């Protein structure tokens, strides 16, 4: 079963045509989706109930994104408490995330991002939940914090992985899986295509990150879960295997990490 392991279809971009988005996903052979929710976004948390009512096989991950970490500058522990409350209120939640560091935009001070990241990893330990990691231009600090907070004990996934083979090996070595998104279909994503070839098939996930990062030939349009099929097809071509084999393996990997 093909799974979109990271999407944002509880966001405002999908409110008007959610039923059609789900129908297209199912028609394309996408059986499940992992919907990412922001713990500090009450409308999104509420919309999650509409999503699950229409697509019973979705599951959720909830966290405070590094872009939002600045809201908790005076009390980083409150970020974890807010995530905990949101998890308690959503029975289909299966992970904490997306959480991590983003030094590309620096929407929050780096030291605040780091502490909010730590507090959420500690929450994951307490709840025995895996984590969904967002990291951009922050590789060394991300791995340092993961090591110091013993994140390998809980595991999880580097979502929308865009690093090189060396970074991929670092993530795999500490027990994390890698999820590839539509960027792997971009013509100039040479290094990422090499990563797609080298990641063990039993450590790989696929995603859309909808509404972002639509794959070729849909670049520049709103992305949606149905298009994870194209991601799986390109990875299959790179690995000289079938799209069905990629779908089966990545679906099983998702099940191992996040469900029932």
Image (cartoon, rainbow, N blue to C red):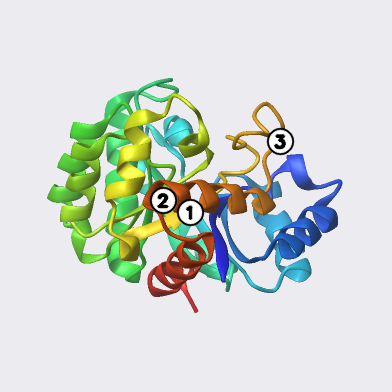
Element at label 2: strand
The residue indicated by pointer 3 is: 222
Q: Specify which label sits upstream in the sequence, 1 or 2.
A: 2
Q: Earlier in the sequence, mark 3 or mark 2?
A: 2
Q: Which residue is mark 2?
A: 179
Q: Position of residue 73 (x, y in %)?
A: 38, 32
Foreground residue, 26 or 71?
Answer: 26
Give percent across and percent down for residue 243. Answer: 52, 59
Q: Residue at x 37, y 33 (%)?
A: 74
Single out the residue that lies furthest toward the bottom: 260
Name the one closer to the observer, 148 or 58: 58
**CA gap, disc 3 to disc 2?**
20 Å
Query: For the residues marked 1 and 2, what is the alpha-carbon distance in whole angstroms?
Result: 5 Å
Q: 99 or 136: nearer the eye?
A: 136
For the question of whether residue 71 can be seen, the reply is no
Which residue of the protein is positioned furthest toward the front in this rendering? 240
**CB within 8 Å, label 1 to label 2:** yes
Element class at badge 1:
strand
Position of residue 41 measured from the top left corner of the image (x, y, whole percent): 62, 44
Residue at coordinates 46% horizontally, 53% vertically from top-left?
236
Q: Closer to the camera, 226 or 194? A: 194
Q: Measured along the vertical axis of the image, is residue 232 above or below residue 109?
A: below
Q: Position of residue 112 (x, y in %)?
A: 32, 31
In the rendered view of the protein, which quadrant contains the N terminus?
Answer: bottom right
Question: Do labels 3 and 1 touch, CB within 8 Å?
Answer: no
* Disc number placed over residue 93 in the picture, else none: none
What is the distance, in whole Å, between disc 3 and disc 1 at their CAs?
18 Å
Question: Disc 1 designates what residue?
Answer: 206
Dot 1: within a 10 Å radius of its alpha carbon, few (fewer than 14), some, or many (20 or more) residues? many
- Which residue is found at the position 85% from the left and 49% from the top? 17
């Amino acid at each position: 079963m093909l799974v979109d392991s990271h999407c944002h279809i509880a966001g405002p971009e999908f409110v008007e045509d959610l039923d059609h988005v789900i129908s297209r996903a199912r028609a394309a052979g996408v059986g499940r989706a992992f919907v990412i929710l922001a713990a500090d976004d009450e409308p999104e948390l509420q919309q999650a109930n509409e999503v699950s009512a229409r697509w019973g096989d979705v599951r959720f991950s909830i966290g405070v994104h590094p872009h939002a970490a600045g809201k908790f500058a005076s009390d980083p522990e409150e970020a974890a408490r807010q995530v905990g409350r949101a998890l308690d209120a959503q029975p289909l939640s299966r992970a904490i995330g997306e959480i991590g560091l983003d030094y590309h935009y620096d929407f929050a001070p780096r030291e605040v991002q780091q502490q909010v990241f730590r507090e959420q990893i500690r929450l994951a330990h307490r709840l025995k939940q895996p984590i969904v990691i967002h990291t951009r231009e922050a590789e060394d600090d991300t791995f340092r914090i993961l090591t110091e907070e013993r994140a390998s004990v809980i595991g999880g996934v580097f979502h929308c992985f865009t690093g090189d083979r060396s970074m991929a090996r670092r993530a795999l070595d500490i027990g994390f899986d890698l999820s590839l998104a539509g960027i792997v279909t971009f013509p100039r994503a040479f290094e990422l295509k090499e990563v797609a070839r080298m990641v063990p098939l039993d450590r790989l996930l696929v995603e859309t990150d909808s509404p972002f990062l639509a794959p070729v030939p849909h670049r520049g349009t709103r992305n949606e879960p149905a298009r994870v099929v194209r991601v799986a097809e390109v990875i299959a071509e790179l690995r000289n295997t079938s799209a069905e084999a990629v779908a089966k393996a990545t679906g099983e990997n998702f099940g191992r990490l996040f469900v029932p």
